[in-house]
Amino acid sequence: MITINITLKELIAADPCTDGLEAFKAFKGPKKFKWTSEAQIELVKGPLRRWLGWAHYKNLIPAINLVGANLSGADLSRAYLSEANLSGANLSKANLSWACFSGADLSGADLSGADLSGAYLSGANLDGADLSRANLYGHDTENLKSRGAIL
């Protein structure tokens, strides 16, 4: 099991934006934790979700891996989940507006009734995903893989 420990010094060395730095300072949750599915779910639902992709890019955290997770109805608006593995996840009726899923694996995910308005899906894998009744208004689908997706 991986243990994550992010210090303010490490964060500053990674050159964060002002908003991200302030959000980290204001974050009341643990800055040291085991990288479990439960911890990852709390992160993607929490106030730091906007900076998770950046933190992964800067090697502060591993990529989000929530294969088969139940995030039905969750508010993940503006979450930065590039390269996340959400294959088979239940994201039905979730608020995914303006979220970034660049390069993410959403194959076989249940996105039925989800709000994907303004979502960035470039390079995402939606093969076999259920997008029935999903709001796809204004989303970016450059290089999207969606073989067998239910629309």
Image (tube, helix red, strand yellow):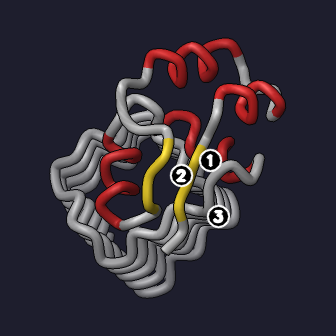
Q: Quadrant of residue 15?
A: top right
Quadrant location of residue 45? top left
Foreground mark, 3 or 1, reads 1
Whether residue 149 appears in this view of the structure is no
Which mark is on residue 53? Answer: 1
Give the CA distance from mark 2 to mark 1.
5 Å
Image-based side of 109 in relation to 107, left or right: left
Q: Residue at x 58, y 36 (%)?
A: 51
* Foreground pick, 66 / 73: 66
The mark nearer the N terminus, 2 or 1, is 1
User: Is 14 displayed left or right of 25 in the figure?
Assistant: right
142 relative to 107, above or below:
above
Q: Which residue is mark 2?
A: 81
**The residue tagged with tag 3: helix, strand or loop?**
loop
Mark 3 vs mark 2: which is more N-terminal? 2
Residue 109, image x, y percentages = 33, 74
Judge left or right: residue 82 versus residue 95: right
Helix, strand or loop under label 2: loop
Residue displayed at 53% across by 18% down = 25
Give the number of the disc on residue 43: none
Q: Determine the residue positioned at 48% across, 75% down.
A: 1
Quadrant occupied by the C terminus: bottom left
Q: Earlier in the sequence, mark 3 or mark 1?
A: 1
Q: Mark 3 highlights which residue?
A: 103
Q: Secondary structure at mark 1?
A: helix
Residue 93 sits above or below residue 92 on the image: above
Residue 55 left/right relative to 68: right
Which class describes the residues within 10 Å of circle 1: few (<14), some (14-19), or many (20+)? many
Q: Position of residue 43 (x, y in %)?
A: 39, 45
Three-letter amino acid code at disc 2?
Leu
Q: Nearer the viewer, residue 91 or 40?
A: 40
